[in-house]
Image (cartoon, helix red, strand yellow):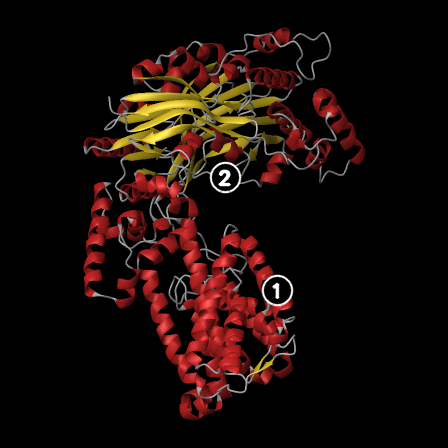
Amino acid sequence: MSVLLRLDNVQRHFGGVHAVDGVSLEVEPGSIHGLIGPNGAGKTTLVNVITGYVPMQSGHAWLQSDELTGLPAHRIAALGISRTFQNIRLFKDLTALENVLVGMHTRRRDDTLAQLATLPMFRRGQRSLMDDARGLMETVGLAASDIAGRAAGTLPYGDQRRLEIARALALRPRLLILDEPAAGMNPSEKQGMRELIERLNQDGLTILLIDHDMRLVMGVCQRVAVLDFGRKIAEGTPAEVSTDAGVIKAYLGTGGEKVVTSAPGASAGDDTDSLIEQTTRARSRAEPDQAILEIEDLSVSYGAVNAVRGASLRVAAGEVVALIGANGAGKSTILNTLSGLIRPDSGSAVFDRLDLTRAKPSAIVHHGLVQVPEGREILARQTVLENLELATWGRRDGAAKRTQIEAVMKRFPILGERRALRAGTLSGGEQQMLAIARGLLARPRLLLLDEPSLGLAPQMVDEVFAAIAEIHREGTTILLVEQNALRALEIADRAYVLETGQIRLTGTGDDLLHNPAVRRAYLGG
Amino acid sequence: MDFFIQLFTDPVAFWNSHTLLIAQIGINSILASSMFVVLYSGQLSLAAPGFMAVGAYTSVLMDLYWHTPLAVNIAAGMLLAGALGVLVGLPVLRLRGVFLAIATIGFIEALRLGVILNLPITGEGLGLKNPNADPLGGIYTVLASLAVILFLVWRLTKGRLGAAWAAIRQDELAALSQGIHVARYKMIAFVLSAVLAGFAGGLEAHLNFFVDPGDQQYGVTRAVQILTFAVLGGSGHFMGPVVGALVVTSLPWVFQQAQAYINVVTGIFLIAVIVFRPQGIVGRGGLAIIRPAWWPRRNVRAPSPG
């Protein structure tokens, strides 16, 4: 069996983080090979290693008989691996045509002398290159005559994605790596992208496809490899992979089977198990009539990308509501809209009579709606105490401030112990505690938590969730956004499942825990 | 005003009375082209005055000691500047943005303060007499070579080399992914820029009877002036820095009446251009004037929604 791309036990660490940990992979010529995995699984790092941006620390890679190990990125590109980028990296100020011409760099003779002499022979060469570039633009479905002369950065989003593929094709690659080509597209654009990928493959091109849209990946790929925490945890046909127990666990997370013995902040003898039970007992069944937060038909877009399309949800005082869904479903966008960081195109969002679509972000915080952002966003070079003090900056009640900081340090004893350490030296879970503590100092009535378990090891996830349950018990209403769906559903009274910007399902946490439709929202099928 | 009145009503008299100014504009335009080449490839290098000094001293010293012809002297200066460009470029071109700018300032100051002001042969800071200078006759050489240089730079930006430079300027990582040897193309631009600066230095020395090693000549002040050409004129088009050089060099003559306040007036003019025309005089958008975000808007009633 011939192999186009072969990786053998490739490793790449960043500090202590095993971004790619011993991955072996074989891509057959003429195939579409999928590469999937949850957020932070190491997919993009693996692509960066293959393409030579990030050197591998051990292992080997070959493209057919050419060894790639240790080659600089431009040599690997010249050998025939081209790629597109997750966050489009066109040459924005160059025209669409010039972008494709740059892609032809490696197969263009050096024309500097001909340029200086402006020879007619050169002009003929130039013209045939331009025709070539126009042809490539037509191949990916761009009307070359209309857009060839426009600056790439001014094109609509979908066209930019296509143009990036045209630029990658200009290299005449043996392997094309597409890094989330359908990210941020609406269903009909996605369908178009899928047709394009299939057409390119039928013309004989081998494609390595990374995407979070499982319908796309499962639909077009012959084989799919799954990464989690830098390791390849499964590989096979789409059908095999989507029913693999390990894959489902990686995507939906695990329930809290282990009982946490020492929840941070839980006073001695306070059993976490009973804690969760208490919250469970108080669960309301249906959508509440009296809501503290009401979102009605909310639509948000980034330029041409429709991130949220007509979402409606409500949260009543005292509830824990989870908003779950795969990467790119629009969860964080909703939270950022509620915090006033993004303005919606249409729809309403009202928190306790405050119109969130118009109020200033500072006024929203003042009103009691506080967000703990994704990725924590703590100040890594400041100490823990300084981070907490900054959260109360601007308040004038000096004494009350100090007692409140002392109180959160008692709630999260680990923060009290490490008050003098730089926040950047804390572990991921401790940083998350710090971010939540900082949110609490703003005295929220509604706390928005964005992916509190992101990138945490399982037992740290347990601790963070125990802390969330306790904050809720003390009377704070919580809107929780999570990829780790099973975990979030366990502590939530109610939950909404978001898929490509729309609410697909809603119900109580228990109902959704056992609903197979949740798995489909993540893994497609 | 007198400046423009004379320029339009009596160009011959203008030429005769402003020959030195025109020659200086020509020299500065060559320096602007040198700046353009590095900026076009995405490198904020301020090394040009250093390479100018190399070109100037090489050419004048060869004339003083060996009595070789001007063309040979200037060519030797360009060669030496280019060679030095390779040596300097190898370590500093790993740096980007403002760090590269600081490293190149380090280079020009080390060269000026460390070498030129210390060697007996360069006059140890007292300067160097250049008895064979030709302030008035040199102008034809300056203008002719400027025309050639502008043509060359223009053609270079049109081919494969120029495409690679533009790609690197826009996004280095994406350029790598297109198979462009980024380090090599940056080096080509840096050395070409050094050669052009060396040429300008040799030519400028030929216009003056005295080579002055001062800061405004080969130091940071000059580097900032050259950068101003590019910022003011716009660095996306090869004519941008040249127009910038034309404007900046002639401003003191245009605003002559301001006398003691000439620098204040010039400064305000520059700020105004940068505020209302951030892309430079020769930039995208034709002659459009950009209204800054803080500029008060006239009350335009927005169509009420729904």
Which residue corresponds to mark 1?
B109
B182 or A419: nearer the viewer: B182
Helix, strand, or loop for circle 2?
loop
Residue at numbered disc 2: A342
User: Is the residue A516 above or below the residue A6 in the image?
Assistant: above
Label 1 Cα neighbours within 10 Å, binned few <14 / some 14-19 / many ≥20? many
Image coordinates for residue A114, horizontal then vertical, percent: 26, 63
Q: Chain of mark 2?
A: A
Residue at image point 39% right, 64% down: B237
Q: Quadrant of the C terminus of chain B?
A: top left
Report the Cα–Cα distance between label 1 and label 2.
48 Å
Q: Residue at x 23, y 34 (%)?
A: A200
**Residue B248: % across, % down:** 51, 74
Instruction: Please tell me how many numbered marks the rendered image carries.
Output: 2
Q: Which mark is residue B17?
A: none
State whether residue B281 appears in this view: no
> Label 1 is found on which chain of the structure?
B
Q: Amino acid at mark 1?
A: Glu
